[in-house]
């Protein structure tokens, strides 16, 4: 899959306002700071297609980017900003759930996981939720370039990925596909694009 063009189309505040189109789409989702904007910019070869100035508290929107005039990358709100103590930690807000369950054009969710840190409960919960609701998901591990910290406790990205997968294995019969990426080195860009093209068989 060659990337010829990438353009921002629209920010929507709910699913009913998303583009009315038959073109297939892939949603990108993950914890705030997971590297979602960087990944979208890396994949599309654009410095600032995905706005890097996302501030907490800003209106959360579903953002459609049209690729090659043919399919969409959809940037969903990051989760896990203010996991209010005591509050039931359902990571997805209502319109994100609505999008996952009702957006007919959705081919697969790309769930971004930070490979530079240990498995996070909230990411596992999100993977579980998608699995339980039969939403197709691929795991995209980010920041795979980051080396083990010198401080005690830090693990190498490959170990964090293995840990995440073994935790998922407790409930998943078959693990979802995974792609290892780095927005710093460009690792995984080609793999990710060919993965997407396989999923929708261009
Ligand atoms: P978002 O909140 O998920 O959109 O995350 P950003 O794309 O804004 O990235 C969050 C932080 O992680 C920034 O400081 C990035 O420079 C850093 N970052 C993102 N991707 C990578 C990566 O692949 N490798 C490394 N080392 N840092 C990254």
Image (spheres, grey):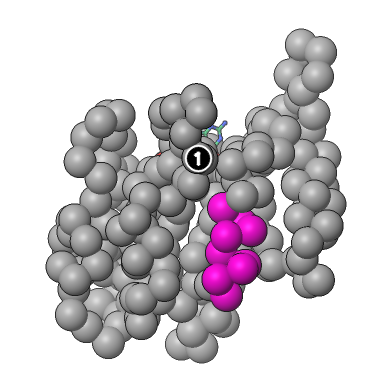
Relative to 159, residue 136 above or below: below
The residue lying furthest to the top in this view is 151
Image location (x, y in percent) of residue 133: 55, 71
Taking 200 as reference, is 54 left or right? left
Residue 181 drawn in magenta: no
Image location (x, y in percent) of residue 48: 28, 43
Residue at left offset 15%, top offset 68% = 17
* Image quadrant where residue 26 sits: bottom left
Image location (x, y in percent) of residue 80: 47, 36
Residue at left offset 60%, top offset 46% = 123
Mark 1 nearby-residue class (10 Å; few <14, some 14–19, many ≥20) = few
Front residue of this view, candidates 86 and 152: 86
Q: Is residue 46 visible?
A: yes
* Image quadrant where residue 84 sits: top left
Residue at left offset 81%, top offset 71% = 173
For label 1, the residue is 88
Taking 74 as reference, is 91 left or right? right
Front residue of this view, candidates 8 and 27: 27
Which span is picked out in magenta?
126-134
Relative to 37, residue 6 above or below: below
* Tag count: 1
Residue 133 drawn in magenta: yes
SS assignment at label 1 = loop
Q: Is residue 31 visible?
A: no
The secondary structure that dominates the magenta segment is: helix
Relative to 17, residue 11 above or below: above
Does the Cβ of the disc 1 residue fall within 8 Å of ligand 1? no
Residue at left offset 25%, top offset 45% = 60
């Amino acid at each position: 899959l060659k990337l010829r063009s990438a353009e921002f189309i629209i920010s929507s505040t709910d699913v009913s306002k998303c583009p009315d189109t038959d073109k297939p789409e892939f949603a990108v989702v993950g914890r705030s700071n997971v590297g979602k904007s960087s990944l979208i910019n890396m994949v599309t070869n654009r410095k600032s297609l995905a706005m890097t100035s996302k501030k907490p508290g800003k209106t959360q929107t579903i953002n459609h980017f049209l690729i090659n005039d043919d399919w969409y990358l959809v940037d969903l709100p990051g989760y896990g900003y203010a996991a209010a103590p005591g509050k039931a930690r359902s990571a997805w807000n209502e319109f994100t759930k609505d999008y996952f369950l009702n957006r007919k054009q959705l081919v697969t969710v790309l769930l971004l996981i930070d490979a530079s840190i240990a498995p996070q409960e909230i990411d596992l919960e999100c993977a579980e939720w998608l699995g339980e609701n039969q939403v197709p998901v691929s795991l995209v591990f980010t920041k795979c370039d980051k080396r083990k910290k010198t401080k005690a406790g830090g693990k190498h990205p490959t170990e964090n990925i293995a840990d995440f997968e073994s935790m998922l294995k407790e409930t998943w019969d078959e693990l979802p596909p995974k792609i290892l990426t780095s927005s710093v080195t460009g690792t995984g860009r080609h793999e990710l694009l060919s993965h997407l093209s396989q999923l929708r068989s261009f």
